[in-house]
């Protein structure tokens, strides 16, 4: 079994400007970061040019693995196409490998037949946009009961149906995998793993939400280490990127110490 390669998503330290965030990653010995288009007052939302972000990453010595994310990607319409082109252009120009694709998550588009057709139509439309720019699409099923794409199996089926195996991969999110309750893993189809833990002993699985997502420690209820061990044993050799949404993580004073301790805990658990 290979050792995990860690990365970090900007949501872990959203108050940091990109250059500062990149330096944090490098100080942790990480070579890969994920940037986001949903952080108010920060790139990409504030209009920072991709060339400026790319230069800051190069100066810090890190690679930009993904832009996270094109939201509601499986609700394809002219507005979504414009958003996709804009983000794909940014991903190309900033040197990112992939664009994360997040499905509709408001209770709509869930009907049997409808959700599969919507997914295939969106992937078929996205494929040439991504191909022209030389980037990948990372499809992220969400475990929430209201989500229009909970199943990795459905995502894989749709990718295969449109001949997109070379252009699309899955995001395995340990939080969403636990919530979805779908046991099957797709290591060969997985391009990225998001890791976060839930330690609140009182919240039910069906009530778990993003603010519950902390760094992985010994009280983790999601079995991150078990999920990671299984993926590694099955041959996954990609990135394990920290993606904690809990406010107490985002606003802590010592990101470096806390993330380093979580990495040590995971490595010890995987031995």
Image (tube, rainbow, N blue to C red):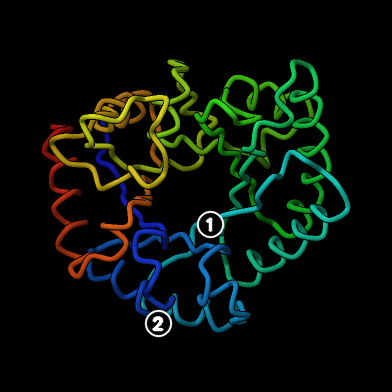
Q: Residue 259's quadrant in the figure?
A: bottom left
Choose between 262 and 231: the one closer to the eye: 262
Q: Residue at x 73, y 38 (%)?
A: 74
* Residue on which the image places disc 2: 59
* Residue 103 rendering spot, x and y as whole percentages: 65, 39
* Residue 49 rendering spot, x and y as whole percentages: 62, 81
Locate residue 209 relative to residue 52 in the image: left or right: left
Q: Calculate the distance from the C-alpha at mark 1 to the C-alpha at mark 2.
A: 18 Å
* Residue 50 rendering spot, x and y as whole percentages: 61, 77
Q: Residue 200's quadrant in the figure?
A: top left
Q: Residue at x 22, y 37 (%)?
A: 199
Locate residue 30 relative to residue 194 in the image: left or right: left
Label tally: 2
Q: Is residue 119 above or below residue 263?
A: above
Q: Which mark is residue 66?
A: 1
Disc 2: CA contacts within 10 A as few (<14), some (14-19) or many (>=20): few
């Amino acid at each position: 079994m290979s050792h995990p390669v860690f990365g970090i998503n900007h949501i872990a330290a959203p108050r940091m400007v990109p250059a500062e965030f990149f330096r944090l990653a490098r100080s942790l010995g990480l070579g890969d970061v994920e940037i986001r288009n949903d952080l108010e007052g920060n790139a990409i939302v504030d209009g920072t040019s991709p060339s400026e972000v790319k230069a800051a990453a190069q100066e810090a010595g890190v690679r930009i693995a993904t832009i996270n994310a094109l939201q509601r990607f499986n609700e394809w319409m002219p507005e979504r196409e414009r958003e996709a082109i804009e983000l794909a252009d940014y991903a190309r120009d900033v040197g990112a490998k992939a664009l994360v694709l997040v499905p509709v998550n408001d209770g709509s588009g869930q009907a049997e037949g409808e959700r599969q057709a919507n997914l295939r139509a969106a992937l078929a439309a996205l494929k040439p946009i991504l191909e022209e720019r030389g980037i990948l699409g990372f499809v992220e099923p969400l475990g929430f009961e209201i989500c229009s794409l909970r199943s990795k199996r459905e995502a894989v089926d749709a990718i295969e149906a449109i001949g997109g195996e070379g252009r699309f991969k899955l995001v395995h999110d340990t939080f969403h995998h636990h919530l979805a309750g779908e046991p099957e893993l797709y290591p060969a189809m997985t391009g990225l793993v998001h890791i976060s833990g839930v330690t609140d002993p009182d919240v039910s699985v069906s009530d778990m939400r993003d603010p519950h997502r902390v760094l992985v420690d010994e009280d983790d209820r999601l079995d991150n280490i078990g999920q990671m061990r299984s993926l590694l044993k099955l041959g996954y050799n990609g990135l394990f990127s920290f993606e904690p949404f809990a406010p107490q993580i985002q606003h802590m004073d010592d990101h470096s110490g806390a993330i380093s301790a979580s990495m040590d805990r995971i490595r010890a658990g995987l031995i």
